[in-house]
Image (tube, helix red, strand yellow):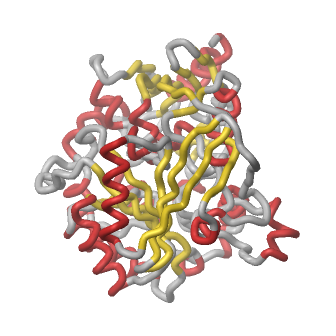
Amino acid sequence: MNVHEKKLKRITEQLKIREGKKPLTLKKRTVSHVVPKPADKKYTDEKLDISDFDEILEIDPEKRICTAEPGVTFEKLVDALMEYNLVPQVVSELKTITIGGAVAGCSIESMSYKYGGFHDSCLEYEVVTAKGDVLVCTPENENNLIFQMMHGTFGTLGIITKLTFSVLPAKKYVKVTYQKYKSLEDYKAAIWEHYEKKDLDFMDGIIHSPVEYVISEGRFVDDAPYTHNYDWTRIYYISTRERTEDYLTTPDYFFRYNNGVTNVYPKSFVFRLFFGRITSSNVTLRAASIFRKILSDKQIPVTVDTFIPFSRMEDFMEWYIKEVNHFPLWCVPYKVVHRYEWIAEDFLKDVQDELFLDIALYGLRRENPEYYYNLIEKELKEIGAIKTLISTNLYTEDEFWQIFNKDHYEAVKKKTDPDNIFRDLYDKTCRAARGLEAT
């Protein structure tokens, strides 16, 4: 903790003596896990180095609570917690996603059908404001709105420098059973049954085609007759179609998508034999960042994470097959733990669903990517669905603040970043990310 306090003092002093109101971007050790945006203005912003905020500070096995800095990766966190037979409530699918990034971008995974997002497991944040003040934020104290609004606002309201969160008991292995369905109706019925019974430790799935639906049912087990991992020649989403069951060590289960979810390259056995060990989502994203000056937006496949109300899934799929028709899709059931403060109150007034389906579209290559981003945004709004802001976002400012809660956002912004050095959320995710000036 003494080392943490020294790091904290360093950045607060830098912020307090900083002059001017030009945008400031955080320098981190790990690569950003948003969709690559070659023209993003963040690359030319002044940087504040927080790359050393990457330590686990405390694990309390009895209370099942962990305290850590934001740059801790899920790989490092899982390894440390497994020594106590514990795991995070939600583990992001890529090894190098950080816990701070998981809060800022609302990460989810196959425990989300029970627990929501990683941010829903958090109990307290230490937040540094743009002026260098340090705030302790919890759901119950005077900074409760700041606590809630840190989720999904991509670092535009302050810097999370420490997180305290709940963890769960775990076992050494995970057994996965792959249940196949031929219709969306049967698929939804099975998902809902598991949601009501809470009889699985993990649940996600792959929609391989309009007539091929798979649920990956995961359960902790003490022993395994064999184990697989998906860091080399095997590709996980393909296994969900070909296999009936699987055994993985618990860490290997968590990171079974680390080489890509449904957009794994290379795919052939021969190329994966030679290059599979050195390819991963992290390597791909880092390469895109390094070579961004010679990349164009048209070279980057369309990538969208959508949150569809469970009751509107038929409407979405009927539209999707007609207008987009790209498969496979990743499906992650997601429990809405409470009505999130960062969503506009009127946006979900007609949506009563407690369960959403994160339908993730990866690797779509078409001649006009912006056409598909625009098309998807408009359809989601029609059915009361949203998408995460990791992708290319084409909303007008009015459209954007019809989805996200402007009143709550601005109330916190006045306290934590009155000079807007971390950029406004709309500007950062919809304008600056595309190389455009703020409106």
Tell me: residue 313, above or below residue 2: below
Report the front residue among 218 and 397: 218
Closer to us: 345 or 62:
62
- With 380 as the anchor, is 180 left or right in this view? right
Looking at the picture, tell me which residue is in the foreground, 65 or 149. Answer: 65
Residue 403: give x, y in percent of width and height. Answer: 24, 56
The residue at 31%/54% (across/down) is 192
Q: Residue at coordinates 76% horizontally, 49% vertically from top-left?
A: 226
Query: How many numbered marks, from 0 up?
Result: 0
Tell me: residue 66, above or below residue 422: above
Percent from the top left, x then y, of residue 240?
58, 65
Residue 230 visible in the picture? yes
Q: Going by the image, does 243 lie left or right of 359?
A: right
On the picture, is 302 further left or further right than 429?
Answer: right
Q: Quadrant of residue 7?
A: top right
> In what quadrant of the picture does the C terminus appear?
bottom left
Q: What residue occupies the far front of the structure in this picture? A: 225
Find the residue positioned furthest to the right: 274
Residue 50 lies in what quarter of the image?
top right
The residue depicted at 38 percent of the width and 37 percent of the height is 150
37 vs 261, nearest the viewer: 261
Image quadrant containing the N terminus: top right
Asked if residue 155 can be seen in this view, the reply is no
Residue 207 position, x and y percent, is 46, 70
Residue 288, position as x, y percentages in the image? 66, 65
Residue plotted at (55% across, 22% down): 66
